[in-house]
């Protein structure tokens, strides 16, 4: 959520803007960027989530001084289309052994961290 009154970036041709927009970007990475999903053949997914972490770190360093906070959350296992909505009992048992809380997450459990990082309450939270 970047706040801007115009669609141009300072320094771009034809832009009269002298200040960068401010705001917050919250990317969604995954625990799979740091933990093997040995049960599944998801190398492409894992690589993309690791890339999200790297992108977040780099943009936070580049844009933080300009007033744009860039953070990421890296949730564990949640019921989504890519996880088959956790309908496989063996899969849920596998997650239970590996998850810190011994269970998959509930989608509503992401709301608080997303709202915190997107809002003004986290105005001094950034990931360099």
Image (cartoon, rainbow, N blue to C red):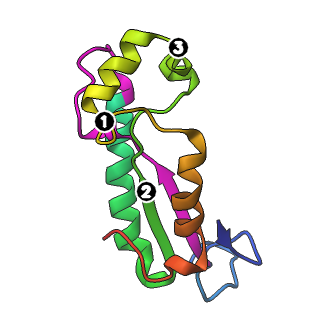
- What residue is shown at x 31% (from left), y 52% (from top)? 54
Q: Earlier in the sequence, mark 2 or mark 3?
A: 2
Labels 2 and 3 touching (C-beta < 8 A): no
User: Distance between the Cα atoms at labels 2 and 3?
Assistant: 27 Å
Residue 111 drawn at (x, y percent): 59, 54
User: Distance between the Cα atoms at labels 1 and 2?
Assistant: 19 Å
Mark number displayed over residue 117: none
Q: On the image, numbered disc 3 is attached to which residue? A: 87
Count of number-bearing discs: 3
Q: Earlier in the sequence, mark 3 or mark 1?
A: 3
Q: Is residue 38 magenta?
A: yes
Question: In this picture, which residue range is highlighted in magenta?
Answer: 22-45
Determine whether, in the image, residue 35 is placed left or right of residue 23: left
Q: On the image, numbered disc 1 is attached to which residue? A: 99
- What residue is shown at x 32% (from left), y 14% (from top)? 40
Mark number displayed over residue 72: 2
- What residue is shown at x 31% (from left), y 41% (from top)? 50
């Amino acid at each position: 959520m970047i706040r801007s009154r115009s669609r141009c970036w300072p320094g771009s041709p034809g832009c009269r803007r002298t200040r960068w927009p401010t705001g917050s970007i919250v990317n969604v990475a995954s625990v799979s960027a740091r933990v093997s999903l040995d049960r599944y053949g998801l190398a492409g997914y894992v690589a993309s989530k690791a890339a999200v972490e790297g992108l977040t770190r780099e943009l936070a360093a580049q844009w933080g001084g300009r007033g744009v906070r860039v953070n990421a959350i890296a949730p564990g296992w949640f019921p989504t289309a890519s996880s088959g909505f956790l309908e496989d009992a063996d899969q849920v048992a596998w997650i239970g052994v590996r998850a810190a809380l011994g269970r998959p997450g509930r989608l509503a459990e992401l709301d608080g961290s997303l709202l915190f990082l997107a809002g003004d309450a986290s105005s001094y939270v950034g990931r360099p």
